[in-house]
Amino acid sequence: MARLDQLRPGDRSILESISGPPALMQRLYEIGMLEGEVVDVLGVAPLGDPIEIQIGQTRLSLRRQEAAAIAVRILD
C-alpha cells in the first residue's frame, strides 16, 4: 500500500486509510477525505512541500507530513 506523499502529479488513487493525531484525522474527515474516495494529485511544490490534491470537487494542499499519514491504493 502506498502513501499519498509518494505519488506524483497526475497519479490517481483511492483513499484506503488515514492515521495520525486525532486532530489531523478529524480535520481531514471534515473536508471530505473518506475511505473509498478517489484522490488526484494535481501538483507538488518545487521543494516537495505542499502537495496539491483534488477529492471530488474539492482542491486542497497538504503538507508532506500530513500526506504521509494517508494510505492509498494507486489506480492504473
Image: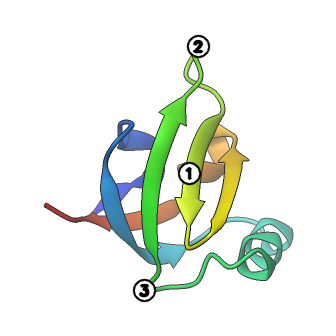
Number of numbered discs present? 3
Quadrant that contains the N terminus: bottom left
Position of residue 48 measured from the top left corner of the image (x, y, whole percent) = 55, 22
Task: Classify 10 Å Cα crowding around label 1: few (below 14), some (14-19), many (20 and above).
Answer: many
For mark 3, what is the residue? Answer: 36
Position of residue 16 measured from the top left corner of the image (x, y, whole percent) = 41, 78
Point out the tag, 2 or 3, that comes first from the N-terminus.
Answer: 3
Position of residue 37 measured from the top left corner of the image (x, y, whole percent) = 47, 80
Task: Classify 10 Å Cα crowding around label 2: few (below 14), some (14-19), many (20 and above).
Answer: few
Give the Cα distance between marks 1 and 2: 16 Å
Q: Secondary structure at mark 1?
A: strand
Towards the viewer: 21 or 60: 60
Task: Classify 10 Å Cα crowding around label 3: few (below 14), some (14-19), many (20 and above).
Answer: few
Q: Residue furthest top?
A: 46
Give the Cα distance between marks 3 and 1: 15 Å
The label shown at residue 47 is 2
Towards the viewer: 31 or 4: 31
Q: Amino acid at mark 2?
A: Leu
Residue 19 as seen in the image, left or right of residue 9: right
Say if mark 1 contacts mark 2, CB within 8 Å: no
Q: Is 66 located above or below residue 38 in the figure?
A: above
Q: Residue at x 13, y 60 (%)?
A: 76
Towards the viewer: 17 or 59: 59
Q: Residue furthest left?
A: 76
Q: Nearer the viewer, mark 3 or mark 1?
A: 1
Residue 76 as seen in the image, left or right of residue 26: left
Residue 50, picture quadrant:
top right
For mark 1, what is the residue? Answer: 53
Point out the tag, 1 or 2, that comes first from the N-terminus.
Answer: 2
Q: Amino acid at mark 1?
A: Ile
Residue 69 visible (yes or no)? no
